[in-house]
Amino acid sequence: MALNVLIVDDSPIARAIILKALRICGVSLGDIHQAENGREGLAILHEHAVDLALVDINMPVMSGEEMLEKLRSEGSAPGPTVIIVSSDHSVTRRQKLLRLGAHIVHKPFTPECLRDVLEALPLGREVMSL
Amino acid sequence: MSRAVAIPEYLLREVAEGVFLTEAFMFLLSDEPPAEMPEYFPHSRAIIEFQGARTGMLVLGLDPGVNHELAANMLGIADEHGDPEAEQREDSLRELLNVICGNLLPALAEPEAVFDPKPPRKVDPQEYGDLVGPLGRCGHTVLQLDSGLAELELYLD
């Protein structure tokens, strides 16, 4: 099985780092989609089958937090597994994101940090060759 | 009344050092700031403004060599595969500042505090002067890296 992945971050370099980390983690990658903000990310999710979304918080146009809220409010389908990849350390925001079903990786992160989160997910264990 | 208090230099240094190391494999040459600052520094500067538990701004300035190494390392571009483009250098500056800011803000308030940083952006010297003028500088450090200097400034209302 290969994962269809969406990476949402306004920084192309940050998206490249996340993609590189996924590859270092040994994730079997299928389609790779990229978006610069939450609105673009939602549009991609409406048009493509995505298994895993890695989403920044602090972005122009629509933040990752708003994107996740809208995604959950749309409701019926389970949607992709969402990992928030952000430097935000607020306990309050973290609790809110966890309630919305997201997993969290703090920037700066190493590939090992991302691997630890992925390994804890059923979806991750299926697609990682470690 | 301003709630601004001085933020210890070591705190800014520790946060910035950790981010440079993890994001770009860049190490500090010294635990101390340089004795003298070069005349033309920094070459490029970005700011990130934040609101919420505290209101203020964080500024990161880089030597050209540091910005080049930063972008090349973040992208994983070896020298023989070409130099990072100007847009990539600017993106690396903004992204590094974004991550430093996120890791520094918790030290400015209680853990439950929520901050709302705006997306970071590059500024020219004129805009930088206009922005920091009304604010009080609460923290400052200069890092010595292999490829040059990096300066971090914290301003709070």
Image: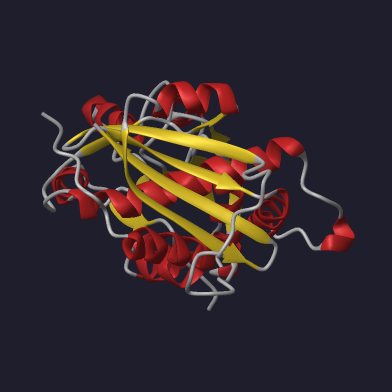
Q: Can residue A119 be seen in this view?
A: yes
Q: Where is residue B128 in the image (x, y as percent from the top left)?
A: 50, 28
A128 over B126 or under it: above or below: below
Which residue is drawn at the image coordinates 48% and 71% (left, top)?
B32
Q: Which of the pair A103/B98 is nearer the observer?
A: B98
A29 over B114 or under it: above or below: below
Q: Which of the pair A76/A8 is nearer the observer?
A: A8
Q: Considering the image in quadrants, where does the C terminus of chain B appear?
A: top left
Q: Can residue A87 be seen in this view?
A: no
Q: In this view, does A81 lie to the left or right of A46?
A: left
Q: Position of residue B42 (x, y in %)?
A: 62, 44
Which residue is drawn at the image coordinates 67% and 59% (left, top)?
B148
Question: Which quadrant of the structure image shows residue A129?
Answer: bottom right
Which residue is drawn at the image coordinates 23% and 38% (left, top)?
B115
Q: Position of residue A51 (x, y in %)?
A: 44, 47
Question: Which quadrant of the structure image shows residue A77?
Answer: top left
A35 over A121 or under it: above or below: above
Q: Which colour scheme is used?
A: secondary structure
Q: Considering the image in quadrants, where does the N terminus of chain B appear?
A: top left
Q: Which of the pair B28/A92 is nearer the observer?
A: B28
B85 over A1 or under it: above or below: above
Q: Position of residue B111 (x, y in %)?
A: 13, 53
Residue found at the very far bottom of the displayed protein: A130
Which residue is drawn at the image coordinates 61% and 50% (left, top)?
A16
Q: In this view, does A85 lie to the left or right of A20?
A: left
Count of number-bearing discs: 0
